[in-house]
Image (cartoon, rainbow, N blue to C red):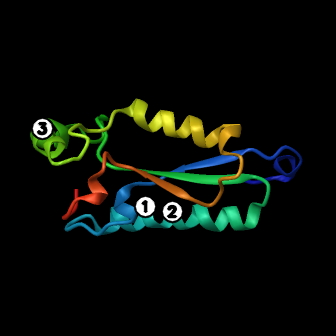
């Protein structure tokens, strides 16, 4: 993934994880474990790659094809439990990605940002 040309022209590596990598949830152990590995990889690569920034995004429930069954069956109920009262849209994640990959975030590396509509600030998990 990393080569000599990246040392001359450092850029940004953006990893997409999940809030599942930070929170335990019944029945999702293997999925959450892989997302936790991506979060750690983000930190580790930032440590090793120097000027090439490495950042991550850990989305909560977003209206995507991957989550369509959950959204169709429980979407309204899950959204009502969030402080923002809505589920995420792909554009929400894209907006954060654009910021993290821009020069406005040039001093950010090694961090993974949760974007979950506030699910992490309420009691219980989502």
Spot the residue most to the top: 91
Q: Earlier in the sequence, mark 3 or mark 2?
A: 2
Confirm or deny contact between disc 2 and disc 1 (CB under 8 A).
yes
Of marks 3 and 2, the one in the foreground: 3
Is disc 2 surrounded by few (<14), some (14 to 19) or many (20+) residues within 10 Å?
Answer: many
Secondary structure at badge 3 equals: helix
Label 3 crowd (10 A; few <14 / some 14-19 / many >=20): few
The mark found on residue 108 in the picture is none
Q: Which of the two labelled residues, at mark 3 and mark 1, occupies the earlier sequence position?
A: 1
Q: Please state if 77 lies on the left or on the right of 118 as rendered.
A: left
Q: Position of residue 70 (x, y in %)?
A: 18, 43
* Outermost right residue: 8
Q: Quadrant of residue 99?
A: top right
Q: Which mark is residue 39?
A: 2
Quick check: 23 left or right of 79? Answer: right
Residue 35, which numbered label?
Answer: 1
How much space separates mark 3 and mark 1, taking CA atoms?
26 Å
Q: Position of residue 35 (x, y in %)?
A: 43, 61
Dividing the picture into quarters, in which one does residue 93 lie?
Answer: top left
Question: Helix or strand or loop: what does disc 1 sit on?
Answer: helix
- At x 20% / y 39%, what residue is drawn? 85
Image height check: is 93 above or below 59? above
In the displayed structure, would residue 30 be above or below residue 73?
below
Q: x%, y% of residue 43?
A: 61, 65
State the separation of the CA atoms marked 3 and 2.
Answer: 29 Å
Image quarter for residue 46?
Answer: bottom right
Closer to the eye: label 3 or 1: 3
What residue is pinned by disc 3? 76
């Amino acid at each position: 993934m990393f080569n000599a040309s990246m040392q001359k022209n450092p850029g940004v590596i953006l990893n997409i994880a999940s809030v599942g990598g930070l929170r335990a949830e019944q029945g999702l152990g293997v999925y959450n474990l892989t997302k936790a590995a991506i979060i750690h990889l983000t930190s580790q690569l930032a440590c090793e790659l120097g000027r090439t920034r490495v950042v991550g995004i850990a989305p909560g429930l977003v209206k995507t094809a991957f989550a369509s069954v959950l959204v169709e069956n429980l979407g309204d109920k899950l959204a009502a439990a969030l402080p923002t009262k809505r589920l995420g849209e792909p554009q929400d994640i894209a907006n954060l990605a654009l910021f993290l990959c821009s020069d406005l975030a040039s001093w950010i590396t090694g961090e993974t940002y949760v974007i979950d509509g506030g699910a992490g600030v309420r009691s219980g998990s989502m």
